[in-house]
Image (cartoon, rainbow, N blue to C red):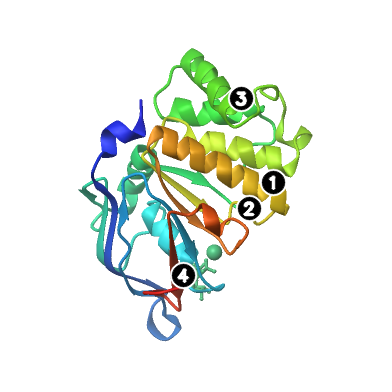
């Protein structure tokens, strides 16, 4: 399955006037104050901003991990603004692959099993997941590390497994929260280049939260957020 065939010509992410308030009463804190964030099919967008500006909050709403307090959020044409907590896992499975700052791989599983597990969650048979995981790991340059466990891989290699896992099952949207923060400059750049080329090849729409100015030149578009609001100009 190719993400492009699902998304051609569409606004894949539509966020309008979104607010998010954590807590309530005297301790309430408004982390997003009316954010507009449209992303077109196939775009490779980077979201930057100071610590505490709301980047992870916005990404978590796009990733169906959190719900917005108010405003409109649509993914692939489906309105998720009114989604209940119990709908979120299905929405996540349908639309989103994640790359985290810390790779979040399962230590006791091989690279192939880590990727295969996601594929099985997305409906692949055990055999199909095994084959597809091998292909994905090959695409990120780890064709010779299928049987390695995370502890036997370098930081850069682990993050490559995490990229393969995010691509597993070809979700239309890939979200990454500071994916290069734990890597040296060269590995950070190479992994972002790999993610970009695979996303362009397969038609994924990508949003990366990053402060890493060494990778900014790979973005189709930079969006800056400050104090819970998107800044019109960087
Ligand atoms: N679960 C939470 N409860 C209360 N406040 C939170 C929670 N998560 C984040 N915040 C606050 O919301 C603001 C934005 O956080 P976050 O989205 O994580 O920012 P960033 O990723 O840009 O550093 C910060 O001030 C943070 O302290
Ligand atoms: Mg953050």
Give the class, few, some or many, for how many residues have Cα within 10 Å of label 3's Cα (few <14, many ≥20).
many
Work out whether mark 2 precedes mark 1 in sequence or the reverse, and give the earlier one: 2
Which tag is nearer the camera, tag 3 or tag 2? 2
- Label 3 and label 4: CA atoms lie apart by 34 Å
Disc 4 is placed on an element classified as: loop
Residue in front for this viewpoint, 49 or 228: 49
Q: How many marks?
A: 4
Disc 1 is placed on an element classified as: helix
The residue carrying mark 2 is 180
Disc 2 is placed on an element classified as: loop
- Label 3 and label 2: CA atoms lie apart by 22 Å
Query: Mark 1 and mark 3 in contact (Cβ < 8 Å)?
Result: no
Give the class, few, some or many, for how many residues have Cα within 10 Å of label 2's Cα (few <14, many ≥20).
many
- Farthest right residue in view: 152
Work out whether mark 4 precedes mark 1 in sequence or the reverse, and give the earlier one: 4
Could you tell me which quadrant the N terminus lies in?
Answer: top left
Please identify the quarter of the rendering in which residue 66 is found: bottom left
Q: Measuring 67% from the left and 39% from the top, which residue is drawn there?
A: 158
Give the class, few, some or many, for how many residues have Cα within 10 Å of label 4's Cα (few <14, many ≥20).
many
Q: Is mark 2 within 8 Å of ligand 2?
A: no
Give the numbered dot on residue 112. Answer: 3
The residue carrying mark 1 is 187
Work out whether mark 3 precedes mark 4 in sequence or the reverse, and give the earlier one: 4
Query: Mark 1 and mark 2 in contact (Cβ < 8 Å)?
Result: yes
Q: Measuring 35% from the left and 41% from the top, which residue is drawn there?
A: 95
Give the numbered dot on residue 54. Answer: 4
């Amino acid at each position: 399955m190719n993400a492009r065939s699902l998304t051609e010509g569409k606004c894949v992410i539509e966020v309008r006037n979104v607010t998010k308030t954590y807590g309530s009463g005297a301790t309430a804190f408004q982390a997003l104050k009316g954010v507009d964030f449209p992303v077109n099919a196939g775009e490779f967008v980077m979201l930057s901003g100071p610590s505490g500006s709301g980047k992870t909050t916005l990404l978590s709403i796009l990733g169906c991990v959190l719900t917005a307090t108010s405003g409109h959020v649509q993914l692939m044409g489906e309105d998720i603004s009114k989604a209940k907590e119990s709908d979120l896992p299905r929405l996540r499975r349908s639309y989103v692959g994640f790359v985290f700052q810390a790779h979040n791989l399962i230590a006791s599983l091989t690279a192939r099993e880590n990727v295969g597990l996601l594929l099985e969650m997305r409906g692949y048979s055990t055999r199909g997941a095994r084959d597809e995981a091998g292909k994905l790991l090959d695409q990120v340059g780890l064709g010779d590390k299928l049987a390695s466990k995370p502890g036997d891989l370098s930081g850069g290699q682990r993050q490559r497994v995490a990229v393969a896992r995010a691509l597993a099952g070809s979700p239309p949207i890939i979200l990454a929260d500071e994916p290069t923060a734990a890597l040296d400059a060269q590995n950070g750049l190479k992994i972002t280049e790999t993610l970009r080329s695979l996303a362009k090849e397969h038609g994924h729409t990508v949003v990366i939260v990053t402060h890493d100015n060494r990778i900014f030149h790979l973005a189709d578009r930079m969006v800056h957020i400050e104090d819970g609001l998107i800044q019109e100009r960087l």
